[in-house]
Image: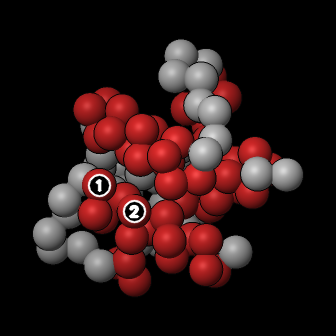
Amino acid sequence: MTVLSDEVKNLIIETLDLEDIEASDINNEDPLFVDGLGLDSIDALELGIAIKKAYDVKIDNNSEDSKQHFYSVKTLCDFIEVSKK
């Protein structure tokens, strides 16, 4: 999963134009929203679109599951891996 997590981290950085952050600065287990990376709801929408395009996965924007999938890089990678099978 190291390759996928690095891809996801770089996708987050590029999609959200995070200038002062490198992939190595993002811990796989840290929250992406509020605490941790500090992303907001607009970032979530942009990131969701980028994930859909990059990995061809279906994301239900209003489900509680989606919120859990976007909790951290690890949960996002787990979701992508399960969705691709």
> How does the figure colour the protein chain or chains?
secondary structure
Q: Position of residue 80 (x, y in %)?
A: 67, 52
Does 29 sit above or below residue 40?
below
Residue 25 marker = none
- Secondary structure under tag 2 reads helix
Number of callouts: 2
Q: Position of residue 68 (x, y in %)?
A: 61, 37
Mark 1 falls on what kind of element?
helix
User: Crowding at label 2, few (<14), some or many (≥20) Cα neighbours within 10 Å?
Assistant: some
Q: Residue furthest right?
A: 85
Q: Is residue 61 above or below residue 30?
A: above
Q: Residue at x 29, y 55 (%)?
A: 15
Q: Is residue 57 left or right of residue 45?
A: right
Return the residue at label 1: 15
**Neighbour tally class for label 1: few under 14, some 14-19, many 20 plus, Cα within 10 Å:** some
Q: Which mark is residue 11?
A: 2
Image location (x, y in percent) of residue 19: 14, 69
State if disc 1 and disc 2 touch (CB < 8 Å). Answer: yes
The residue lying toward the viewer, choosing from 56 and 14, is 56
In the image, farthest residue toward the top: 62
Amino acid type, residue under disc 2 in the picture: Leu
* Residue at x 45%, y 39% (from the top left corner): 48
Residue 34 visible to an observer of this rendering: no
Percent x, y of residue 70: 53, 43
Left or right: where does residue 13 sit relative to residue 77?
Answer: left
Residue 77, image quadrant: bottom right
Residue type pointed to by label 1: Thr
Q: CA distance from mark 2 to mark 1?
A: 6 Å
